[in-house]
Image: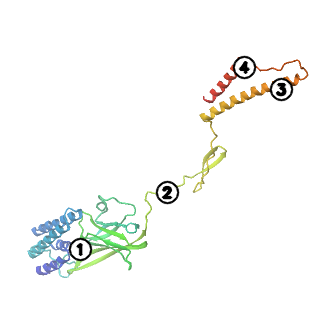
Amino acid sequence: MKTLATIQNELRDLVPQGNDLVLAAMKKTLKPGTDKYNDYLALEGRYQDVSRQLLQGVVSNEDATLEFNKIRQAIIEFIDDLKASDILELASNSTTEPGMADVYNGEVLYRIPKKMQLGIEEECVVRLAFDRARLIKDFQVEVGDVMKDLRISDVMGVELLDPTSDKAFTITTLHDTIQFVEKDLVTEWIFCVTPLKEGQFPLVLKISIIEIINGIERKRNEVLKEQVEILTQIPPADELVFVSAGYTWQVTGADEQRAISGDAKSAEAVSPQPAPNRPSNSGKAAAGLGFIGKVIAGVATAVIGGVVLYNVSDLGNKSAELPTEIAVNDAEWEGVRKLEKARIGRFYQ
């Protein structure tokens, strides 16, 4: 059996590695239902509250760091005050050590855009949870997001890496690489990625299960690689794409077209035939005036013809006098006017 002093020393050795790691180890070491276990729950709640406020921007980095330091000091005092009655009894030959993380079935969701624009910062998101319902709660899943089953533990590490020797990306984050994973909450990492040059380049997502064995941190890694295309300009996502409706056009006459179904994957454009000209109002008026001109020309022709015929027929009669005026009576002119009025009026109907 391990002694109380040995267990306390193992826990103290974890303090410099981070509050989340030592809290996870304490959870596995303490006996549930004791007063000391309840004090541990209060410490863990303080740590989670500050972490959440930092992510939400409620507190500044300086204030959060100050509060994390206070929690670290409280953890050290907590370890110093442990009693044998607070510790789970562990057999010395057991393969399970204090602080060794249990491994569970969980889910991971990550968003790494397949296309990025040169010089424009993009957000890459990684989320871990113990089930899919919590994983996507209050999160807008987009096309291209990847979800998969993953073995996870109470303490996980996530890194987004550029594996190329000649760096193609700059990658920054405000999250700790290693975080504590609660069963009823989602744990999230956000990375800000800026492409540096044009072309096809990989990004590597490394997800680590953190275990403490014999007081030493051990990792089991899941490595995922995504290929990213970096463009100088990304086409608009809402650009229209035309798809054939399965119809082609057949011209059946000079002024007629109709659509027929077909199996052609694309339809050839057919230039529409111009519709027959329809007389406009000005055309109607012009047509009416032209008709009057024709009537007047006809009357003049008849008059001149009459004069010519008269002269030809009477060339031998020297005693006859040539007419000096050809009279058109009022009734004839009135008939012409009525005819033209009726003609013009029909064009305007």
Q: Name the residue under label 4.
A: 332
> Cα distance, mark 1 to mark 2?
51 Å
Q: Mark 2 points at which residue?
A: 241
Question: Nearest the camera: 151 or 111?
Answer: 111
Task: Give the residue type that dot 2 points to.
Answer: Val
Residue at x 9% of width, y 76% of height: 80
Task: Give the residue type that dot 3 points to.
Answer: Val
> Cα distance, mark 3 to mark 1?
130 Å
Q: Earlier in the sequence, mark 1 or mark 2?
A: 1
**Left or right, residue 201 beside residue 345:** left
Q: What element carries label 3?
A: helix
Return the x and y of residue 310 as percentages of the image width and height.
84, 23
Q: Name the residue under label 3.
A: 308
| Callout 2 crowding tier (Cα within 10 Å): few <14, some 14–19, many ≥20 | few
Q: How is the image coloured?
A: rainbow
> Cα distance, mark 2 to mark 3?
79 Å
Q: Mark 1 points at which residue?
A: 101
> Cα distance, mark 1 to mark 4?
121 Å
Task: Give the residue type that dot 1 points to.
Answer: Ala
| Callout 1 crowding tier (Cα within 10 Å): few <14, some 14–19, many ≥20 | many
